[in-house]
Amino acid sequence: MIYWQVFWAHFTSNLLGYGGGPATIPLLQHEVVDRYGWMTNGEFSEIVALGNGLPGPIATKMAAYIGYDVAGIPGAFIALFATVAPSLILMIMLLGILMRHKDAPQVKRLTKVVRPTIAVLLGVMTYDFFFDSFTGSGWVHTLILIVVAYVLLEVRKVSPTWVVLGALIYGAIFLGG
Amino acid sequence: MNKDLFIAFFRAGMLGYGGGLSAIPLMKREVVDRYKWMDDDEFSDILALANTLPGPVNTKLSGYIGWRLNRWTGMLSSLAATVLPTAFLMVILLTLLNAFKDKPWVQGMARGVIPIAGVMIGVLAIDFLKKAGVGLGWPLTVILVVASLALTEFAGVHPAIIIAVLILSAFIPWRKKGGAS
């Protein structure tokens, strides 16, 4: 049963996540936090942050950890399979049809039309994380971390690895009380 | 062949930070420039194809390229190189963090990364919103944003249902045109 739930959570999130790995994150959060209650928003945010700090595709890293956390090593492989296999199988099978229609306006619209919804889901998730941090660490620390992280990531283009490492150290020193 | 595939996608995966998209130019460098398995146009075609399907882009690219060059074993080598090393690192790191969850400084570390995750996801949200505005026009984007927010947050509709409906809606005019031509 648990294996089936792990499979289903990742299967639906990735099959509906148009726009690559990042688009699947809020859908996955919905399944993992809201629907099955496997972890809290705070725990999910750790996965997002560490997943961004490590190299490689984000969706598979998250799947591996969530699967492992919920159902051990078999869970990790089931989650990875559910993340990778469906769209890859579709791609190999539908190759000919897709090649002919990849420039068709309908196919292009497919990606476009889900973007506002994905943006809303990502926006709500941002609010959830900020709110969690606000209640857990107070607004001073939250604000400092938000501003510094934003400037480093978006203005100075520092690698996420260093930003996540910095936040871990900052947290260990100032937020451990 | 399989060893080359593994090395190529391992390199591209380990050097590509910040989600899948940053690894795509690195994949291209391996597949097109270094190993010359295909030319530029072919790679672009495969990328465009991968973008028309849902789910993570990297694994579709590496899996498909592996499959094309060496069928099942090629596909599995490429996928293993793309997915497993970083998945393994992720499990080790988080398990380690969880093992010391009772220590106050580890709890502090966990608190420290929450706002960082918020910033990362927030940046993605803005990015998706901008692209939506450019692609669909702002009036339609605003309507869809308000409707999505109302349905998911206040009416409690599962987001998967909204996305499924939107995907189907993209196909409706296509059927009409197909029937007419």
Image (tube, grey):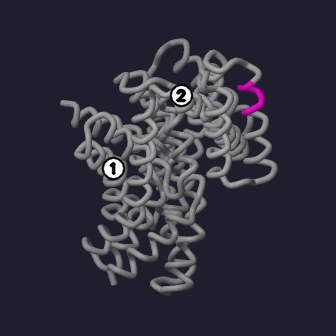
* Front-most of residues A132 and B100: B100
Residue B162 locus on image (x, y percent): 48, 29
Position of residue B100 relative to residue B54, above or below, is above
Q: Is residue A110 visible?
A: no
Quarter of the picture containing the N terminus of chain B is bottom left
Which percent across, then down, holds residue A37? 37, 22
Q: Amino acid at mark 2?
A: Gln
The circle drawn on residue B107 is 2
In x, y percent, where is residue B132?
Answer: 66, 41
Q: Is residue A112 magenta?
A: no
- Residue bounds of the magenta highlight: A141-145
A61, A31: nearer the viewer:
A61
- Relative height, residue B151 to residue B131 (above, below): above
* Image-based side of B70 in relation to B101, left or right: left
Question: Counting other residues with Cα less than 10 Å from the Cα at mark 2, is it few (<14), some (14-19), or many (20 or more)?
Answer: many
Q: Secondary structure at mark 2?
A: helix
- Give x and y (percent) for residue B50: 47, 60
Secondary element at image label 1 = helix
Badge 1: chain ID: A
Q: Residue at x 29, y 36 (%)?
A: A6
Neighbor class of circle 1 (other Cα within 10 Å; few <14, some 14-19, many 20+) is many
User: Which residue shows up at 56% across the image and 30% down it?
Assistant: B105
Q: Does the image show residue B41? A: yes
Identity of the residue drawn at 22% across and 37% down: A3
Q: Quadrant of residue A33?
A: top left
Classified by dominant secondary structure, the portion drawn in magenta counts as helix
Label 1, on which residue?
A: A80
Mark 2 against mark 1, which lies toward the viewer?
A: 2
Q: Please tell me in which quadrant of the rendered image residue B130 appears.
A: top right
